[in-house]
Image: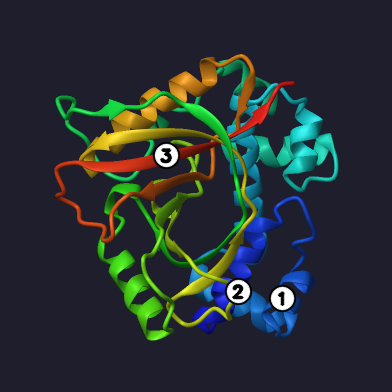
Amino acid sequence: MDPAVLTRSLTHIQANLDGNLSLRALAAVAGCSSPYFARRFADTMAETPKQYTSRLRLERAALRLVLLDDGILEIALDCGFTCHETFSRAFRRRFRVTPQAFRQKGRLPAAAEQELPQRVDAATPVSLSRTVVRTLQPMSLAFIRHTGPYENVPIGLWDKLMDWARRREIPAPYVLLGIAHDAPGITKPENLRFDAAIRVPGEFRSGRRVGHQWFPGGLFAFTTSVGPFVSLPAAYKEIFKRVRSDRSLFCLGVPCLEFYSVNRVVADLAIVNTEIAIPVRSRR
């Protein structure tokens, strides 16, 4: 499958987990026949379209069962399932427990405590600002996707994006950010999705390497982390603790955003201001 078509299909799935993701609908987005799309998607992703969309829906549901007070049926419908029974059967096949039993554990699997991209020494210093809730405006983004462990995200992806932007005569300075779409501990390490991204003025057609996505914005809890990039996992652990203890908010978990206050992402910078944004919903 052409990489640009695949990128368009993946971003469509990501944005429409509560909608129609039938094989016919996805093939229409890709502009090809259903049999061709199914075959090429499976060859590229090592999952059929149905397996891929079902996995993402169930992983979203698992995270929301832990983080939200919404009813199980409400979560099921929001994740694209048509009824409680269908959802419960699929959830039990995937996680080996019922949705209710998963919720009663009251926390994510232990592996989720390493929240984002790189490993951290417990002695690594990190300084955090207070956490404030702000509305993030919609953004048009150019991105390159990394699939695999968050700590293995190549730093050079942002250089590739900026080179791409300069060739298209998109003026600097660029807003550099990263988007983590999955929760470690729920999603297997080899399936974690992370987008290196930059803001762009408007929509464009995804290419073989750089894709386009429209990020809808919304309500986010923002915290500034001051320290090296390797301190981010420790920062995330503390920020999630803060947000989940705030009784005025529901913590939605993902996607998490990182805005880098630099003009180039370099792994070994001693001090970087990173704006970490975690999606939330007001209880009021």
Residue 124, image x, y percentages: 16, 30
Kindly identify which residue carries mark 1: 29
Give me the C-alpha separation between circle 3 and circle 1. Answer: 32 Å
Task: Indicate the amino acid at tag 1.
Answer: Val
The quarter holding residue 47 reads bottom right
Is there any visible trace of residue 257 in the rendered image? yes
Is there any visible trace of residue 114 in the rendered image? no
For the point 51% across and 73% down, which residue is it? 211
Query: CB under 8 Å between callouts 3 and 1?
Result: no
Q: Of residues 34 and 229, which is closer to you in this image?
A: 229
Foreground mark, 3 or 1, reads 3
SS for callout 3: strand
Q: Callout 3: few (<14), some (14-19), or many (20+) C-alpha neighbours within 10 Å? A: many
User: Which circle's residue, 3 or 2, is located before the other in the chain?
Assistant: 2
Describe residue 85's horizontal placement relative to residue 167 as left or right. Answer: right
For the point 64% across and 17% down, which residue is it? 248
Residue 275, image x, y percentages: 39, 41
The quarter holding residue 272 reads top left
Vertical position of residue 206 compared to residue 251: above or below? below
Task: Indicate the amino acid at tag 3.
Answer: Ile
Kindly identify which residue carries mark 3: 276
Give me the C-alpha separation between circle 3 and circle 2. Answer: 25 Å
Residue 135, image x, y percentages: 61, 40
Give me the C-alpha separation between circle 1 and circle 2. Answer: 16 Å
Task: Indicate the amino acid at tag 2.
Answer: Glu
Kindly identify which residue carries mark 2: 203
Foreground mark, 1 or 2, reads 2
User: Which circle's residue, 3 or 1, is located before the other in the chain?
Assistant: 1
Residue 185, image x, y percentages: 44, 36
Quadrant in which the N terminus is drawn = bottom right
